[in-house]
Image: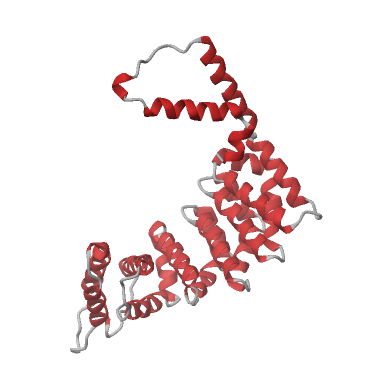
Amino acid sequence: MGEDNLQSHPNWNAILQWSLRFQDEPSENRVLEPLDQERREFLMRAFEDYAAMTEDPVKSMRRHLEVIKNPASSKEDCVVALEEIAFHAEDIDEANDLYLMGGLQVCCAYIKHYDPELQSLACEVIASAVQNNEKIVQFASETFVLSDLLKLVDTAQHEMVRVKSLLAVSCLVRGNKGALEKFNELDGYNVIVRSLQSPVPKLQLKSLFLLSSICLDSPDQCKVYNSMGVPQQLFAMCSKFSTEDHTAETHDASILITLKLLHTLAIHSKVDFPHDALTSFTSLRDSLGGDRFKEERTFCTLLIKLRPPSTDGVDR
């Protein structure tokens, strides 16, 4: 709470001063006793002040929705409104309220907005609202939402929009069989494979995470991604990892998810290991020192064991 708020609510300021005095007193000197009437009334007034300052979530969302529905609203006001709605949507009950009042539909329309920042924020609202919410997942899957999100992942000109739309797709599809079926129907697997080839690190990482989740939850999908050449992309990434400096924290997640995904694909589909697989995985394992890379080294060893035996004396 800022200083201005304390000054405008003297009861809060008094409580702060009282609590600080009480905290400074040695614990052995404190005597716990029932509140007298004066103190009780003082605390009740403070709690009433707090209740007056706290806006009902539904009213708050309605107020912010009016902002983004008003064509005369400034971009700055719309940014604040979408940020607040995304915050509310993190709570499953408030996400349901948002959907029931038609607010989610209004926010979803913003993924077609011309402004990339507002598009990205609309994607954040969707990503928050669909998590662990079957009703909203069904809505997003059966309407234009999933289709439009995939188009943004594939064709948006702004990096931020592509990353945020992929976040929304990932939250929507992961662990949801119906949404995954719709995702496949919309050629989502090709969209994700193309984004895996992106030079944008965040987009590549989110693609890896989604592919790994899909293949772990639905092993039958491994054959699809194997036939599309995903293992070959992952082998190339591992060879590149083996030549890089791994002192920076930013590389950790990419390496681990790549190795896990490759391991999952190798277990559930017939993966063709490249001729230099042994050298590549051994080199990568040796370059990953310290406790923080322990799991990565384990997956390197597992992949070395999974490669087929050589019949021509060539490293496989």
| Residue under the image location 20 percent in, 79 percent down | 309
Q: Is residue 280 left or right of residue 96?
A: left
Rendering colour mode:
secondary structure
Q: Is residue 314 left or right of residue 177?
A: left
Residue 181 appearing in the image: no
| Residue under the image location 55 percent in, 30 percent down | 13
User: Foreground: 312 or 256?
Assistant: 256
Locate the C terminus by quadrant: bottom left
| Residue under the image location 51 percent in, 26 percent down | 15
* Residue 246 image position (x, y, % from top left): 31, 73
Q: Is residue 123 left or right of residue 290?
A: right
* Residue 286 image position (x, y, % from top left): 21, 75
Q: Is residue 243 above or below residue 212?
A: below
Give the total of numbered labels.
0
Which of the 4 image quarters holds residue 183? Answer: bottom right
* Residue 221 image position (x, y, % from top left): 43, 64
Locate the N terminus by quadrant: top right
User: Foreground: 114 or 228?
Assistant: 114
* Residue 78 image position (x, y, % from top left): 70, 54
Which of the 4 image quarters holds residue 222? Answer: bottom left
User: Foreground: 254 or 1?
Assistant: 1
Most extreme residue toward the right is 72
Residue 214 appearing in the image: yes
Which of the 4 image quarters holds residue 230? Answer: bottom left
Q: Is residue 91 above or below residue 109?
A: above
